[in-house]
Amino acid sequence: MIFTFVIIAFILAWFFIEITLFLTYKNHNDQDDKGKISYKKFIWYLRLIAFALLLLIFIYMQYSEELSFKKAIQYCLGIIK
């Protein structure tokens, strides 16, 4: 069940990121592109990083079943007493 929430959150966040980058690129016409990375190359690097992070999240969730989800959230947010 938790894996489903992670996948849904990832898809929604990625959808927002893709739309934002597309609209930003479409509205920005810069003629001086020397030394800059291309849009397509940047998107593929970003997708690769996102996939690696998703994979690491799944590995963490799989091997830390003894930890409760609430404790993990408290640890990530820094609200441990």
Image: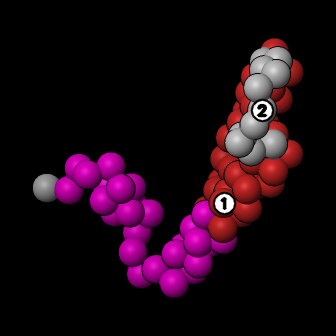
Q: Quadrant of the C terminus?
A: bottom left
Residue at which label 2 appears? 33
Q: Nearer the viewer, residue 31 or 29?
A: 31
Precedes in sequence: disc 1 or disc 2: 2
Q: Quadrant of residue 14?
A: top right
C-alpha separation, residue under disc 1 versus residue under disc 2: 24 Å
Q: Is residue 68 visible?
A: yes
Identify the residue shown where x is 33% and y is 49%. Answer: 77
Q: Nearer the viewer, residue 55 or 28?
A: 28
Residue at which label 1 appears? 49
Q: Quadrant of the N terminus?
A: bottom right
Q: Is residue 15 visible?
A: no
Q: Nearer the viewer, mark 1 or mark 2?
A: 2
Instruction: Determine if the magenta segment contains residue 66.
Output: yes
In this rendering, is residue 58 above or below 70?
below
Kind of residue at disc 1? Ile
Kind of residue at disc 2? Asp
Residue 75: give x, y in percent of width and height.
Answer: 30, 59
In this rendering, is residue 14 above or below 61?
above
Region rendered in magenta: 53-80
Q: Nearer the viewer, residue 73 or 34?
A: 34
- Left or right side of 19 for 65: left
Please, what secondary structure does the residue beneath circle 2 have?
Answer: loop
In this rendering, is residue 4 above or below 23?
below
